[in-house]
Amino acid sequence: MKAFCICEKLLIAIYNKEITSGSVHSVFSGACNIKTDKGMVTLLSGEKEMSPMSLVVEGPVDFKKLDLSRNMPVAFSPEAIAFGNSSPGIGLGDSRRWFPGVAAPIEKCPEKDLLKNLTVLERGIEAYCKHGGIGSIVGMLGVEMPELGLVTMEIYPEDKIVRFIKSRFLDFIHAVACGDTGSAADRAASVIGFGPGLTPSMDDFIGGIMVSLVYLAGYYDMEPERIYHFNRQLISGAPGKTTGISLEMLKHSAEGETNDAVRTLMLAVLGGSGEEDILDSLKRTVNIGETSGSDIILGLYVGLKILTNFKFRGEWINEPVCRHPERELL
Amino acid sequence: MNLCVDIRKGSYYDSVALMLVTKEIKKMSGVTEVIVGMGTDLNKELAANLGLSDVRISGLTPNDFFIAASAREDFKAETIINRVDELLNREKPDNAGEIRVNTLGAAVRHLKGANMAVISLPGKYAAAEAARALQNGLHVMLFSDNVSVEEELELKKLGRDKGLLVMGPDCGTAIINHVPLCFANVVRKGSIGIVGASGTGTQEVSVLVDRLGGGVSQVIGTGGRDLKSQIGGIMMLEGFQALIDDPETKVIVLISKPPAPEVAEKILSLVKSANKPVVVDFIGGDRKQIERSGAFACISLEDAARKAVSLLNGKEAEDFEGFEKPETEISELVTKEVSRLGSGQKYLRALYTGGTLADEAMKLLGREGYGIYSNIPLTPEMKLPDIRKSVKHTCIDLGDDDFTLGKPHPMIDPSGRAERLVQEAGDEEIAVVLMDFVMGYGSNADPAGEMLPAIAEAKKLMKEKGKDICIVGYICGTDNDPQGCKAQKEKLEEAGVVLMPSNAQAVRFAGRLLDQLNNK
């Protein structure tokens, strides 16, 4: 097997011998996660989306057929990733490199076009997103916080699950909307880990919000460190509250690092690509997991609606208590 | 209530598997509530909130997988555990090597050489995807309906400018380079090219061409609105020209409901440049206009097929308006069927799955003086006041939107027609039921078999009143269709259905029955 494409950060870590070994954490048909001292490394089948600290092999692969078992040792070298059995390793030579973060500077369209692109995104959400994860909760958000101007999603009768999480979720969103770092951290801790999925739906949603904040900081020329600090605080209470895989995802998202489909979607919305590009990348994102992709999109969407709203953006920019320890008070 | 808990520590399952488990456990009889997830604090708290927690759940870590369900007292936890095992260990189909794409762009990249996109999306989104396909150099078959006239016009102009077909919207039938698309029959390859603005009309002609020993070169669909003024017959013209230019096509057949007058003129003006015979069935359209153009006019879809095959064989194209069986046999059959009916029985109920076949039935019977009520009436005054309740002579197109909102088309799922048939049998005045059985790709695997219980029930209901019912049927299919025409025919004849070899002949036979009942 050969790697078709590899995350640049992963390759550098291997070259610098920061990652030399690990053990198999979990195996799925389309993916294999390897636990290392530098975090989770993910091997992906050819049709999957490039993601932070991952590589995509050439062609479709069913990892379950490779006889990989939990805790099996894995060795990393600049030439290959080798498994502790007779399975073929993965050659790393000649693989393409992929950068997981925001490619700065981002191409920006005029704000009036950004707002038009948001309506395209809304249409895509309506048409293509699966609402079995965080969907009904975001639908409730649209009703309870009309100032966000969220598109009206099909609202199911408020069930026990929505009622359970409702007040904490609303408090969390209020805190994000105001850029209130201190309370956002506590409130995020009260909702992280909620929902179905190996990466719980709420975590995917929060990941989406954080990624959108990073990209919008670039769009609006906001101080990027403020956003990174906010995001890191947001997930500071996450360890122990969610799955190991989800925690990794949250950490990457806090830095604006996300998979290729989500990145392409954000760049399409912010950069003046046409409707076709926005909907194509939205559909790519929906295809991630069962509802993970849709939950991420909803997070991106809510983040976009917050910071494209002049009132909320004003709170973010003018709020002197962004809780950044080194920032001078405005 | 019984709390059933299944815990799998340090186990990881992908989201698709977890969603499947949730759905399947919820469906189990006896289960009232279920939560499936990882043992995060919040999920554990939710479980407790829903009354689905105990000390086993509270001790979980976020990396532990759990299922907690409340069920009837007598429900065993093992039942859930076994079912979960079954679902999670289910062998995936061996298509792990397939690339699954979810965008048109990816599909184009992965399927090199693709030249056709078949689009079946909700109408709201279909036009955009169709445009994208055209921009990628693909011909389009647009099965979707609810595409606006404006969008259709834009798409067809774009297709025309790029030299690409736009078949649709609402196009259900095509055979391109001998490949049947959507609802289509397995038809012999040959030299008769068809352009049709009608699904079952096109199927009828292609099937009869096959039955008469001919074959098709291409069958191009245009969608039902193509020949209206707003669209101007763009795809009919493009398809017609394509067949004129195709060396493999020796005879051309055009099928549509009557076009807008200016559109008919445009289409017929191309006939002169055809240099090959052109048969035109503008179902019920202006015969003289068609003949003036040099084309051959038709009195039915069957007539169009017969003329095309005759012309291909260098023979005269004469009108066919009778029966294949000898007249004596038909007369005897009519007398025999009528003799089983009771007094007062006089009405026809035609229950069609194909709209064009229903339309043809009403036109043929209309020529014989019968006014037919319908959900797709020939004239406004014959519109059924309530489409779910027949009146006097009624012909229903069960494939029309009013009957298929949120339901499969009756060609796919005949249960709606089965129910209607039994309902009709509650009316003591009905004498004749007329039905089509459409075979081919896309259709139900056993159209005849699916209707047998309803046919038996309808006959039983009539017999209980000392009456009977004459069911006349037509199988639109070929011997090579997946359903097996021969077996379908045997089933229906065994159930007492009188089968005719074309829709036109079935309608004529029904007309003869009505004539005798009404002493005409």
Image (spheres, coloured by chain):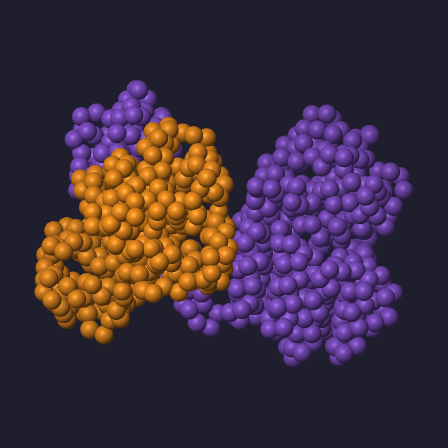
Chain colours: A orange, B purple
Quarter of the rendering occupied by the C terminus of chain B: top right
The location of residue B352, given as percent across then percent down, is 68, 45
Q: Is residue B279 above or below residue A221?
A: below
Q: Is residue B143 above or below residue B368?
A: below
For the residue pair B33 and B273, the one nearer the viewer reads as B33
Q: Residue at x 36, y 38 (%)?
A: A174
In the drawing, does residue B383 fall left or right of residue A48?
Answer: right
User: Which image quadrant is residue B97 in?
Assistant: bottom left
In the drawing, does residue B38 fall left or right of residue B310?
Answer: left
Q: Is residue A145 above or below residue A270?
A: above
The location of residue B204, given as percent across then percent down, is 68, 58
User: Which image quadrant is residue B314 in?
Assistant: bottom right
In the drawing, does residue B365 fall left or right of residue A25?
Answer: right
Counting labels gives 0
The location of residue B103, given as percent across then percent down, is 44, 60
Q: Residue at x 44, y 42 (%)?
A: A148
Quarter of the rendering occupied by the N terminus of chain B: top left
Q: Residue at x 71, y 73 (%)?
A: B251
For the residue pair A280 and B309, the one nearer the viewer reads as A280
Q: Residue at x 62, y 54 (%)?
A: B147
For the residue pair B100 and B85, the one nearer the viewer reads as B100
Q: Is residue B362 visible?
A: yes
The location of residue B221, given as percent across then percent down, is 64, 62
User: Which image quadrant is residue A16 in?
Assistant: bottom left
